[in-house]
Image (cartoon, rainbow, N blue to C red):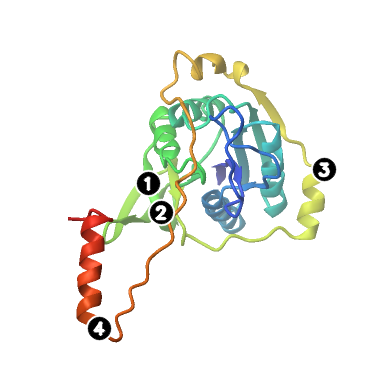
Amino acid sequence: MKCIVCMTHVPDTASIIKIGADGKHIDETGIKWIVSPYDEYALEEALQLTETKGGEVTVVTYGPQRAEAGLRECLARGAHNAVHVVGGEATLGDSFAIARVLASALKDREYDVILVGVKGVGTDNAQVGQMLAELLDLPHVADVVKIEWKDGAIVAEREVEGGHEVVESPLPAVITAQKGLNEPRYAALKGIMAAKRKPVEKVEVSALGLDEEALSGADATCRIRSLELPAEKQAGKIIQGEDDPQAAAAELVKLLHEEAKVF
């Protein structure tokens, strides 16, 4: 089985985010970058599949130079090959632009399945996997939490509101992995040392027949006008009601009406 895993390199979910000086990007000072957690499920599924059925796992990312660290993390966990499409700063948040670049990078490669995290932590758009499938003219199953691999097909369980839906699809296909699909492994020391010596294939966006300047300009489907941090939460009010619950209830109703404006 030839598996391709699309990976994105994101700020650690424990990072304290600050707005950059331009008001359109985050301040990357002191940020720790990691493999997007949902992409870890995609990678683990691919690794387990090739361990069972044989084959190889190729991890592909579209991102700036620092994204190579994410690729090497995937190599350390057991991926066989890594492809780095260099760029992405200007197309941040534009799911269609990202999908177009990835589709162009993958269209001439051999694969039986493409696995993607259900969303990239940070932008949380949950769109790239589905767009990638459409651009490659492949069937796709989203929000997958369980997979049964058959000869030339899969039976997958996906999350829907109120339960799970069972879907059968021919291969090749695109699968977007959801939390619960598996338990991602950690990189062993041997894998970490080996990953340092493995080559990473570098690809320029222009070599794919795309103009990154146009993707972020005239052809952009998403533009970031500004970023703002959420407003700080105001301190809550505690109404003491042990001695006079009726008065406390009246005070609560008054505050909900006059201050919270809920009715």
Asked which secondary structure carries label 3, the reply is: helix
Q: Residue at x 68, y 54 (%)?
A: 77
Q: If you read the primary sequence from the N terminus, does the residue marked by circle 4 or circle 1 appear first? A: 1
Vertically, is 199 above or below 187? above
Q: CA distance from mark 4 to mark 1?
A: 57 Å
Disc 4 packing (10 Å; few <14; some 14–19; many ≥20): few
Give the mark count: 4
Q: Residue at x 37, y 71 (%)?
A: 238
Q: Which mark is residue 197?
A: 3
Residue with the most extreme bottom position: 243
Amino acid on which the number 2 mark rests in the picture:
Val
Mark 1: few/some/many CA within 10 Å (<14, 14-19, 20+): many
Circle on res. 184: none
Report whether residue 164 is seen. Answer: yes
Q: Is residue 184 left or right of residue 75?
A: left
Where residue 260 sits: x, y (%)? 27, 56
Tell me the distance, in whole angstroms, between the alpha carbons under discs 1 and 2: 7 Å
Query: Are discs 1 and 2 less than 8 Å apart at CB?
Result: yes
